[in-house]
Image (cartoon, rainbow, N blue to C red):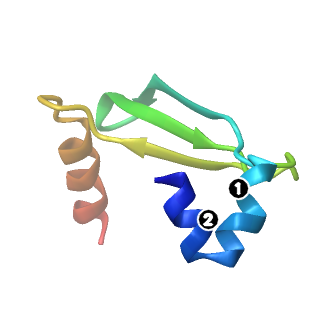
């Protein structure tokens, strides 16, 4: 597959040897919300190559857990 991509894309052929991929972590994180209670999410973090001090952090719902629904209900009731 890599050789096909190198052949098809001069940009890919230039970028591939650099292997410029940052670290990726995933873990569970618990928050205590004053009204929604205990909320648990899977936290994923992406660190761009070269560690420029940038982080992309996303909190995702956990299957069979109602944390996202409870938090959404709180934000809906405030509007």
- The residue at 32%/38% (across/down) is 35
Q: Nearer the viewer, residue 70 or 24?
A: 24
**Relative height, residue 20 to residue 4 (above, below):** above
Dot in front, 2 or 1: 2
How packed mark 1 is, by other alpha carbons closer than 10 Å (few <14, some 14-19, many 20 or more), is few
* Residue 46, percent from left and from top: 62, 45
**Residue 13: which quarter of the image?**
bottom right
Residue 34 at x, y = what percent?
40, 34
Residue 19 x %, y %:
74, 46
The residue that appears at 24% across and 64% down in the rendered structure is 76
Which of 33 and 63 lies nearest the eye of the viewer? 63
Q: Position of residue 30 (x, y in %)?
A: 43, 23
Is mark 2 in CB contact (under 8 Å) with mark 1? Answer: yes
Q: CA distance from mark 2 to mark 1?
A: 8 Å
Q: Which residue is mark 2?
A: 6
- Left or right of 29: which side holds 69? left
Is 52 in front, or is 73? 52
**Quarter holding the C terminus?**
bottom left
Query: Which of disc 1 and disc 2 is earlier in sequence?
Result: 2
Specify few, some or many for label 2: CA neighbours under 10 Å numbering under 14, 14-19, or 20 or more: some
Q: Which mark is residue 16?
A: 1
């Amino acid at each position: 597959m890599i050789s096909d991509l190198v052949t098809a894309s001069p940009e890919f052929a230039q970028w591939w040897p650099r292997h410029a991929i940052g670290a990726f972590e995933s873990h569970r994180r618990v928050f205590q919300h004053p009204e929604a209670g205990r909320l648990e999410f899977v936290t994923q973090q992406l660190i761009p190559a070269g560690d420029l001090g940038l982080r992309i952090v996303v909190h995702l719902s956990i299957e069979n857990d109602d944390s996202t629904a409870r938090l959404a209900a709180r934000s809906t009731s405030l509007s």
